Image (tube, rainbow, N blue to C red):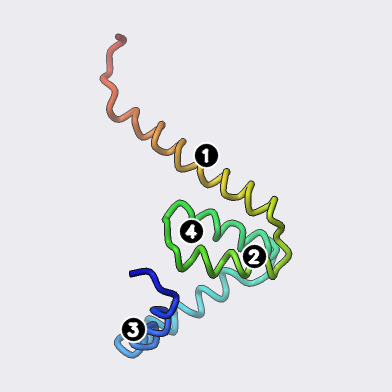
Amino acid sequence: MYDMANLKKLSVLGEGAPEAMKAFWAFDKAALKDGVVPKKYKELMAVAVALTTQCPYCLEIHRAVAVTAGATQEELAETALVAAALRAGAAVTHATHLMGGGKS
């Protein structure tokens, strides 16, 4: 089902909701542009989010842009491990909801 060619269908989505799609693209562009946080770091954050949400489209797009912005393989590797730590940490801390109130 995952195929980068599917991204061509975004225009069909935009035709169905043109105002919302235009607003989405403007927001996306504004959020990811170079600013106080440099573009490379924003793209590394996007890679981490893509890894945790497991979006292959986002992962492929933002990895490429991160590399273009100067990200190294080592930075991508550390980003991946930060994402893994956060995802694992979320599972561990969320597990506290499973624990009873008393001591065992």
Spatial separation of the CA atoms under disc 1 and disc 2 = 20 Å
- Mark nearer the N terminus (1 vs 2): 2
Residue 64 marker:
none
Mark 1 belongs to which amino acid?
Ala
- The residue sitting at 34% across, 30% down in the picture is 95
Which residue type carries mark 4? Ala
Is residue 74 left or right of 11 when viewed as pictured? Answer: right
Give how far across and how far down residue 79 sits, in percent: 60, 50
Element at badge 2? helix
Per the image, the residue denoted by label 1 is: 85
Q: Amino acid at mark 2?
A: Ala
Can you give x and y, in whole percent of width and height, for residue 31 in the image?
56, 69
N-terminal of the pair, mark 2 or mark 3, is 3
Question: Which quadrant of the figure contains the C terminus?
Answer: top left
Q: Which SS class for mark 3?
A: helix
Q: Name the kind of residue labelled 3 in the image.
A: Leu
Query: Could you classify mark 3 by the number of other residues whose Cα lies within 10 Å: few (under 14), some (14-19), or many (20 or more)?
Result: few
Mark 1: give few (<14), some (14-19) or many (20+) Cα within 10 Å: few
Query: Of label 4 and label 3, which has the lower sequence position?
Result: 3
Report the disc number at residue 66.
2
Q: Are marks 4 and 1 in contact (CB under 8 Å)?
A: no
Real-space Cα separation, disc 4 to disc 2, in angstroms: 13 Å
Q: CA distance from mark 1 to mark 3?
A: 35 Å
Question: Residue 50 got which mark?
Answer: 4
Q: Where's residue 11, x and y in %?
A: 39, 87
